Amino acid sequence: MAKNLSSATFTVLLLVLLMASTEILKIEAMNIKARCLPQGCKNPTFSEECGVEPFPGSNNDCCHCCVAKYGRKAVCKGVVEGPDKHCHCYKERV
C-alpha cells in the first residue's frame, strides 16, 4: 500500500510540475509577442539594419530583431522602411 501511495504521489507531483512549467512557457510566449519598446524614441537616429532583405515581418518583429541583435540599451525602435522593406534599427540621438 505504501509503495502504491508513493508512486501516486510521485505521479501527481510530476503532473503539477509539468503544468507549472507549461504555464511559465505560455507567459514567456505572451511576452515575446508583446509590443516591443513601447516608449519608442524621442530623438531617433539610424543605427543599423537587421534581418533579411526584404524583411518579411512587421515593425514589431523588426524591433524584436534589433533588440535581439544589438541589445535593448542600444535600440529605441525598429521599423520596416522603404520600397525594399529593410528592417532599420534606431537609437537615441545623443
Image (cartoon, grey):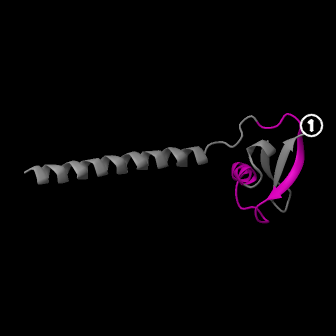
Mark 1 burial class by Cα count in 10 Å: few <14, some 14-19, many 20+: few
Q: Is residue 7 left or right of residue 16?
A: left
Residue 84 to residue 21: above or below: below
Amino acid under disc 1: Val
Residue 27 to residue 58: above or below: above
Kindly give the residue lying farthest to the left in the view shown.
Answer: 1
Kindly give the residue lying farthest to the right in the view shown.
Answer: 94
Badge 1 marks a residue whose secondary structure is: loop
Q: Is residue 31 left or right of residue 12?
A: right
* Position in image of residue 87 (x %, y %): 79, 56
In front of the other: 33 or 85:
33
The answer to if 9 sits in the magenta stretch is no
Identity of the residue drawn at 74% across and 44% down: 72
Kindly give the residue lying farthest to the front in the view shown.
Answer: 2
Q: Is residue 90 left or right of residue 94?
A: left
The answer to if 66 sits in the magenta stretch is yes
Residue 75 visible within the image: no
Identity of the residue drawn at 12% across and 54% down: 3
* Position in image of residue 30 (x %, y %): 54, 45
In front of the other: 33 or 48:
48
- Residues drawn in magenta: 40-68
Residue 62 visible within the image: yes
* Position in image of residue 36 (x %, y %): 69, 43
Quarter of the image with the C terminus is top right
The residue indicated by pointer 1 is 94
* Position in image of residue 66 (x %, y %): 76, 52
Identity of the residue drawn at 42% across and 50% down: 22
Q: Residue 49's image quarter?
A: bottom right
